[in-house]
Image: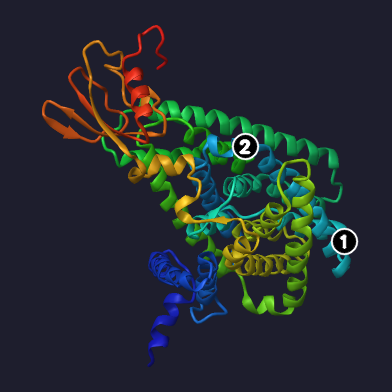
Amino acid sequence: MVLSDVTAPLISSITLDNILLIGSILLFVSLLASKTTRFGIPTLLLFLLVGMLAGQDGPGGIVFNDPKITKFVGAIALSFILFSGGLETRKADIKPIVWQGLTLSTLGVILTAVVVGLFVSWVTGWSLVEGLLIGAIVSSTDAAAVFSILRSRSIGLKGNLKPLLELESGSNDPMAYILTLSFTYLLTVKDANWIVLIAVFFKQMILGGVVGYAAGLAMHRIFNWIRLEAEGLYPVLLITMVLLVFSFSDFIGGNAFLAVYLSAYVLGNTDFIHKKSLTKHFDGQAWLMQIIMFITLGLLVTPSAIMPLIGLGLLISAFLILIARPLSVFITLHFFKINTREKLFVSWVGLRGAVPIVLATYPMIASVDKSNGIFHLVFFISVTSVLIQGSSLPLVAKWLKLTVPVSSKKKSVLDLEQAWETKSVYKAIPIEPHFNCIGHSIVDLKLPPSIIVALIERRNKFFISDGATRLHAGDVIYIMADDAESIDQLTDCFNTPKEKKKI
């Protein structure tokens, strides 16, 4: 008896008995594989590769062919990834480019879907709706791919390119989702009605937007109102809220992805308890979800089914990268003050990653004709996009002369909030009995991001504020700031008369 005979029953399929063992092994292997990014291989592609090697066509031999579970895992993972991205998006960073980003994430997605759809229909002989379905699936850039690659590369980008790309990738999934559902509906319902599709589109976008905005405000109030016994419960509370926003929006017919991203954006631009630690915590959650999602997608794909589609996949990938994406970018950004080199770079950062592959499971679940071929074709297009565009981003940025030295690159508001080492001024401020801040928590003071409350001294004892700490007369606040002017503003804030103070 050989070792493979013993282990074969364990890994031939995923069951409740072995799912934790298999899952933990795959996660560990993926983390080890991520160290190879020093050779220029995108991390997310390695996660896919781990899943494929563990699948039924690989040495792992795991049989996994359930698109419904894949869709569920993908939807939950994307909600965490989008929430993390929204939580780190600051209004001050995207304000100069908000209209450019939203135009790319709506009109740009539609143009890409239509252009790719027409091309696919022409070269394959498939129906126009089938071509448009593929175009819709690959129409959005992938937030997980863009976020991870932009934040892991040690290069600085000129101007507002980085926030523009992150805003686009974080906000264009809802449009691609709507288009995918619409064309799937047209292919599965004989008496399909365009009026119904238009009504559903506006219903999803409006309800998703309203739920997301209201949920963000509610999260802010809840976090600053509730007082949990253990600090470790706050991440649990935020995870619960993310799942609640996603599921509630989906339950009432709203766009759940839009609701999650918008709620995170609203919350991230307010002051709430444990903001810094929760933002970092969710960054880790997003990475975990990315690994799980890519491994699951890798398990679902059958490499042998991709081989006959390589020629067509390369043709569509080349058209998408070189023609469709640049065309949509140049058209949508025509009326904005963005130079040609920046438009070319935005065109190149149109990475397709896990989102199109997750969306490709929707036609499979709906039993659309050719759905299996569509899934594997989209998988190949996404892998090609991440491999070619993702690995060449630093080189393309240098060619277009859009890079700046890391030491001199523009820091975002989030960078300033989280980088303690950037503070250059330190001061201790005693809280006098007449200060109006007495009785209020640190988070209620709405301090600017240029200021950090490092320590609080009370009765000769020092402790670090968690944002919920209420100030007492006699406290000494030890703060760090970017400059002396910020400290003067803080002193004025503490000592503002009641009738003028806004808490």
Which of the 4 image quarters holds residue 335?
top right
Taking the spot 38% from the left edge, 28% from the top edge, the residue there is: 486
- Please report the residue visible at 55 percent of the width from the left and 40 percent of the height from the top: 260
Residue 377 visible? The answer is: yes
The residue furthest top is: 499
Q: Quadrant of residue 314?
A: bottom right
Residue 428 place in picture, x, y as percent: 23, 28
Instruction: Give the secondary structure at mark 1.
Output: loop
168 is higher (above) or lower (below) than 207: below
Q: Tell me the quarter of the image containing the N terminus.
A: bottom left
Mark 2 element type:
helix
Q: Residues within 10 Å of mark 1 (few under 14, many from 20)?
A: some
Q: Point out residue 269 in the picture as x, y percentages from the top left corner.
A: 49, 33
Residue 182 shows in the view: no
Q: Residue at x 16, y 34 (%)?
A: 462
- Image mark for residue 234: none
For residue 57, above or below residue 293: below
Discs 1, 2 touching: Cβ within 8 Å: no
Q: Position of residue 69 (x, y in %)?
A: 56, 58
From mark 1 to mark 2, how far is it between C-alphas? 41 Å
Q: Is residue 273 left or right of residue 375?
A: left
Residue type at the position of mark 2: Pro
Mark 1 residue type:
Ser
Please state the horizontal and vertical placement of residue 477, each as a whole percent of the image.
Answer: 24, 27
Q: Which mark is residue 96?
A: 2
Binning the other alpha carbons within 10 Å of mark 2 as few (below 14), some (14 to 19) or many (20 upward) gives few
Tell how many labels. Answer: 2
Q: Residue at x 44, y 79 (%)?
A: 9
Residue at label 1? 127
1 or 2: tag closer to the N-terminus: 2
